[in-house]
Image (cartoon, rainbow, N blue to C red):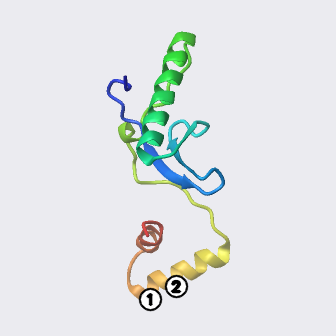
Amino acid sequence: MPLKNDRYTYRVTWSEDDQEYVGLCAEFPSLSWLAKTPELALKGIREIVKSVIEDMRRTGEEIPQPIASKRYSGKFMVRVPPEVHRHLAIQASESGVSLNRIAGAKLSR
């Protein structure tokens, strides 16, 4: 039976090393599940996440909040080498937009 109100972020991808699909959960990066089909990989990772959450509840551990439930401000600090900063500032000036807009556009690609 799946986790009630499961809002975690799952991904299924092919593992060339294992020659199987691997199910992953962003909020639990140490967990994975291998299976012959993508559907079984997703089912497996969801079941293991449910099991881990049940164990965490029993032991009183803090359960990760789903990424989808978090609120983001849209602001974060990024450090780049001075020459990258200069290059971006020139691009922004030549384009007639802010440095913030140039950086945001590049990050959203």
Q: Residues within 10 Å of mark 1 (few under 14, many from 20)?
A: few
- The residue at 48%/34% (across/down) is 44
- Residue that protrudes farthest toward the left in the picture: 5
Q: Is residue 80 left or right of residue 44?
A: right
Cβ atoms at labels 2 and 1 below 8 Å apart? yes
Report the front residue among 31 and 14. Answer: 14
Q: Is residue 69 left or right of residue 47?
A: left
- Residue that protrudes farthest toward the bottom in the picture: 94
- The residue at 49%/35% (across/down) is 45
- The residue at 62%/62% (across/down) is 79
Indicate the quadrant containing the N terminus: top left, top right, bottom left or bottom right.
top left
Q: Is residue 84 left or right of residue 65?
A: right
Q: How many marks?
A: 2
Q: Which residue is mark 2?
A: 90
Report the front residue among 33 and 91. Answer: 33
Q: Position of residue 30 (x, y in %)?
A: 62, 37
- Residue that protrudes farthest toward the front in the picture: 36
Q: Amino acid at mark 1?
A: Glu
Q: Rounded to the nearest whole Å, what is the CA distance between mark 2 and mark 1?
A: 6 Å
Disc number at residue 94?
1
Vertical arrangement, residue 36 with respect to residue 76, above or below: above
- Give the SS element for disc 1: helix
Q: Residues within 10 Å of mark 2 (few under 14, many from 20)?
A: few
Vertical arrangement, residue 30 with respect to residue 57, above or below: below
Q: Position of residue 77 (x, y in %)?
A: 55, 56
- Give the SS element for disc 2: helix
Q: Kindly indicate the quadrant of the structure image that contains residue 5.
A: top left
Indicate the quadrant containing the C terminus: top left, top right, bottom left or bottom right.
bottom left
Vertical arrangement, residue 44 with respect to residue 37, above or below: above
Q: Amino acid at mark 2?
A: Ile
Report the front residue among 82 and 54. Answer: 54
